[in-house]
């Protein structure tokens, strides 16, 4: 194989070669990201706890439940504990600084999530002050926050009447071993929110967003779910109780048919890239028709002629695929910090990056096969007569 000639052909149109490899790189990078998103959504459901239930309004997740429901749910056989959860929706400085905030019952929340550990501060520190909160390690790194720092939030759902901000103090930083509890969330005292509402200092809905219910060991989740739903069958607010896996699946459903969407996007991109590479190789083959005639007249075999074009297509695609896969792996941590709040378990796997590289090589083989066969079959006299 005349490698110098191959290199010369590749660099004959450097801009075109760069754009071809770049398009393949984008396709492989996007494939890795889409796969990570798909796997992340699936992982959140697959790794959900079997001992936790979520109780929400049967009307909608956005309809609050009465606080009186807590003691009633606690009385259901098989229920170990009940934690109040309320979405806060505050803004830190600017809407672009979005992160989740929930009002919860600290001690019960900590007991319900054994996979979460405080790496700085203690549960006792959190419980000491009603304005205290804990934050995830990733959230702390994102804003450079430390224990003792103050976090002012602008109320949106729960806006203060006097227009002032909510002031929270970081009492602890946690790490999570579960994809169902991300490290980019803030948790504060539910009682702080409830008392402020009762005092009339805040405008907003009263009640509880959802009740997190932990089960006693060995309890049948389906039986507990049936008992909870039956208890509130006649109101005043009907409820829907689900396992944690089903609760996570609801968020996937809210996004529509995510798997179909991701596959459609990935398939469309690969389809387009294949024809882009095919068009590039066809253009290169047409431009070199006279060169092929000269090479054949000098004694170069059909295998060498076709092989040059085929290897060129594979080389361009392989370079692009390697760059796209490498970029995806290198940016895994940064992408995770962006998507983890929305897609728990988001992670780019090395095996997927390798598959993307192999797929780019396959695209090069398929796109280069037809032009290579054409160059093999063309007669030297015919090639020399053609205009470049």
Image: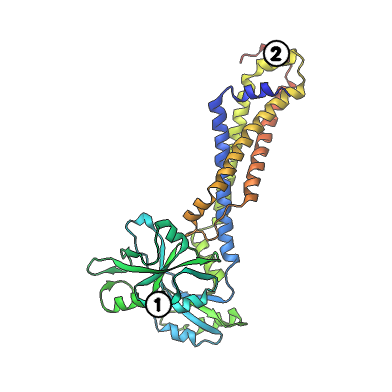
Q: Residue 56, position in %: x, y?
A: 46, 74
Looking at the rendering, which quadrant does residue 276 occupy?
A: top right
Element carrying mark 1? helix
| Image point (35%, 76%), residue name | 129
Determine which quarter of the picture holds residue 289. top right
Q: Is residue 381 left or right of residue 184?
A: right
* Mark 1 burial class by Cα count in 10 Å: few <14, some 14-19, many 20+: some
Q: Compared with residue 191, is residue 245 higher up or lower down, i.e. above or below?
A: above
Q: Quadrant of the C terminus?
A: top right
Q: Residue 182 placed where, x, y %? A: 50, 63
Q: Of the residues under marks 2 and 1, which one precedes in the sequence?
A: 1
Which image quadrant: the N terminus? top right
| Residue 169 visible, this orientation | yes
| Viewer-closest of 299 and 122 | 122
Side of 353 where 192 appears, left or right? left
Residue at 32% from the left image edge and 64% from the top image edge: 153
Mark 2, Cα crowd under 10 Å, few <14 / some 14-19 / many 20+, is some
Q: Secondary structure at mark 2?
A: helix
- Report the disc number at residue 55: none
Expressed as whole percent of the image width and height from the top left, the position of residue 150 reads: 33, 65
Say whether residue 206 is visible: no
Q: Residue 52 appears in which quarter of the rendering? A: bottom right
Residue 294 badge = 2
Mark 2 or 1, closer to the camera: 1
The residue identified by callout 1 is 127
Q: Is residue 339 above or below residue 278?
A: below
Q: Is residue 267 above or below residue 131?
A: above
Q: In percent of the image, x 35 and y 68: which residue is there?
A: 169
């Amino acid at each position: 194989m005349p490698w110098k000639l191959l290199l010369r052909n590749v660099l004959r149109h450097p801009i075109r070669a760069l754009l071809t490899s770049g398009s393949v790189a984008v396709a492989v990078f996007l494939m890795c990201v889409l796969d990570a998103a798909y796997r992340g959504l699936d992982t959140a459901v697959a790794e959900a706890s079997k001992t936790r239930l979520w109780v929400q309004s049967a009307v909608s997740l956005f309809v609050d439940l009465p606080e009186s429901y807590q003691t009633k749910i606690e009385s259901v056989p098989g229920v170990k504990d009940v934690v109040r959860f309320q979405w806060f929706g505050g803004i830190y400085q600017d809407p672009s600084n979005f992160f989740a905030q929930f009002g919860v019952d600290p001690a019960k929340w900590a007991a319900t999530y054994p996979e979460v550990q405080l790496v700085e501060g203690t549960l006792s520190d959190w419980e000491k002050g009603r304005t205290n909160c804990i934050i995830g390690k990733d959230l702390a790194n994102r804003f450079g926050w430390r224990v003792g720092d103050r976090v002012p939030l602008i109320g949106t759902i729960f806006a203060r009447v006097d227009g002032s901000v909510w002031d929270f103090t970081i009492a602890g930083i946690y790490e999570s071993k579960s994809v169902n509890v991300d490290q980019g969330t803030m948790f504060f005292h539910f009682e702080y929110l409830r008392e402020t509402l009762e005092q009339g200092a805040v405008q907003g809905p009263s009640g509880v967003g959802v009740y997190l219910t932990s089960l006693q060991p060995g309890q049948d989740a389906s039986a507990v779910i049936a008992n909870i739903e039956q208890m509130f069958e006649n109101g005043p607010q009907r409820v829907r109780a689900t396992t944690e896996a089903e609760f996570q699946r609801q968020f996937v459903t809210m996004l529509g048919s995510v798997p179909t969407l991701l596959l459609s996007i990935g398939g469309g991109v690969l389809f387009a890239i294949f024809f882009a590479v095919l068009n590039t190789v066809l253009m290169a083959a047409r431009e070199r028709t006279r060169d092929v005639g000269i090479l054949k007249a000098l004694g170069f075999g059909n295998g060498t002629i076709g092989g040059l074009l085929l290897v060129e297509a594979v080389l361009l695609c392989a370079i692009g695929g390697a760059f796209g896969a490498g970029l995806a792996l290198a940016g895994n941590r940064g992408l995770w910090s962006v998507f983890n709040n929305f897609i728990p378990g988001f992670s780019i796997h090395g095996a997927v990056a390798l598959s993307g590289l192999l797929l780019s090589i396959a695209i090069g083989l398929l796109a280069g096969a037809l032009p290579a066969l054409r160059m093999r079959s063309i007669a030297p006299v015919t090639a020399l007569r053609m205009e470049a």
